[in-house]
Image (tube, rainbow, N blue to C red):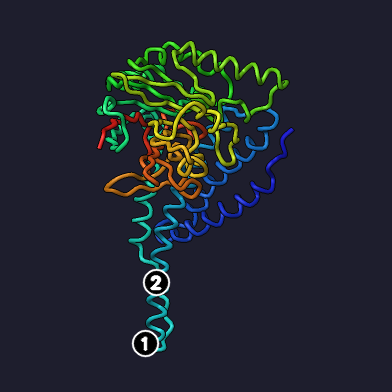
Amino acid sequence: MRNRPYIPLLIFALFFFLINGYAFSALSLVLSTAILSWLWIIPATIFLVFSYSMIRLSVNGPTNLFKISAHALLIYFVSALVFVLAIMLTDIYRLAITIVKYFIDGNFSYPARPITGVYLGALLSFLIIIAFIYGIFRGKYAYRIIKHTLYFDDLPAAFDGFKLVQISDVHAGSLKNPKAVQKGIDLINDQHADLFVFTGDLVNNKAEEIKPYIEHFSKIRAPFGQFSVLGNHDYGDYIKWESDLIKRQNLQHLKNYHAEIGFRLLLDEHVTLEKNGQKLALVGIENWGLGFGERGDLNKALQGTTTEEFKILLSHDPSHWEAQVKSHPSKIQLTLAGHTHGMQFGFEAFGLKWSPVQFRYKHWAGIKEKNHRILNVNRGFGFIGFSGRVGIWPEITLIELRKR
């Protein structure tokens, strides 16, 4: 049985209610004490229901009550935090003005909190709530085509203009809308790429989760084939199994489903793609990620390739590229990864890119180059945990290889 999370809940409760206390102190400028007293019911109820369902996880597993309360808590907490940050900026400004005036005329006079700060915070909080509602109902299926043209000195001339489509992190156990998923698959096929690759996490935990979507994903076809690797969730490490045998059988079933879909699963191995007599190596390894299982054997997968050979590596976790690939003696020109989802929450616009996941991963989305080797991190096709996406949309990557 899992340890009940009393201590983490108590710590979070302290932080949660301190934030609410600060927010309500600002709201007292525009609302009466009686109204504020009633409003306290909202955060208190959300937190208590979430806490109850969280403690019952060890008995009931994730229930609808837990999922609803967790989403309500997330939306409320983020919107309250944004409100508090807006108020905090005005309070810092007030403090700065007070200090300056004190040193100039020796008079300590703390100015009143401006009501405009409250209105600004309320507006930002409202926009955050709207963004979360959109992300839950529409954003998680709002597939985007992200295009990259990548140039290489050592690309075989026959592959100049070669196109590949990458998706990652389907997380079929979270998908609930087959029609929306089919639109994403139609977008994949509409790219008319030469090659299709999938970089892991087909399911959340159990192989059976992909069964309702086998027919959909089996429609993906590319002239040079469809290839895949496993991600950390595919091994079933995050739930309790009746026995190790059943867990191993689940993994075997998942491998069989890859084949049924039409994906050639690469398990620490490589295949050779040939065009007009020239070749490149497509390499795929089992999941290797810092903190998420270091199963993959890159050296084994590269056996039979040469240093000069052009290589594309499928490796689910981008931390593998940082730890091994970018400095590996056998040059791997292009690595394709996923895993991060961009945390399904963030901001990408006007040349700016931010997500909380950047505190965990050096590179969490898009293209990165080091030592003349390129990494692309796909933002994910599906979602897990938070049943939505805000600012970080589901991605279908189209990459064109060009010879420099």
Q: Of the residues shown, which amino acid type is indicated by label 2? A: Arg
Seen in the image, is 50 located left or right of residue 272? right
| Residue 328 position (above or below residue 257) | below
Q: Secondary structure at mark 1?
A: helix
At x 38% / y 31%, what residue is drawn?
310
| Distance from the alpha carbon under mark 2 to that under mark 1 | 15 Å
Q: Inspect this view and state whether residue 389 appears.
A: no
| Residue 96 position (above or below residue 175) | below
Q: Position of residue 384 (x, y in %)?
A: 50, 31
Determine which of the numbered discs, if any, sits on residue 104 in the image. Answer: 1
At x 42% / y 46%, what residue is drawn?
355
Q: Position of residue 140 (x, y in %)?
A: 40, 30
Image quadrant holding the C terminus, namely top left
Determine which of the numbered discs, if any, sits on residue 94 in the image. Answer: 2
Q: Which residue lies most toward the bottom here?
A: 105
How many residues crowd around disc 1 within 10 Å: few (fewer than 14), some, or many (20 or more)? few
Quadrant assignment, res 215: top left
Q: Position of residue 79 (x, y in %)?
A: 43, 48
Front-lying residue, 48 or 195: 195
Determine which of the numbered discs, if any, sits on residue 372 in the image. Answer: none
Quadrant assignment, res 139: top left
The disc, 2 or 1, on the residue closer to the chain's N-terminal end is 2
Q: Secondary structure at mark 2?
A: helix
Q: Of the residues shown, which amino acid type is indicated by label 1? A: Ile
Seen in the image, is 115 located left or right of residue 235? left
Q: How many marks?
A: 2
Q: Are marks 2 and 1 in contact (CB under 8 Å)?
A: no
At x 48% / y 41%, what residue is drawn?
329
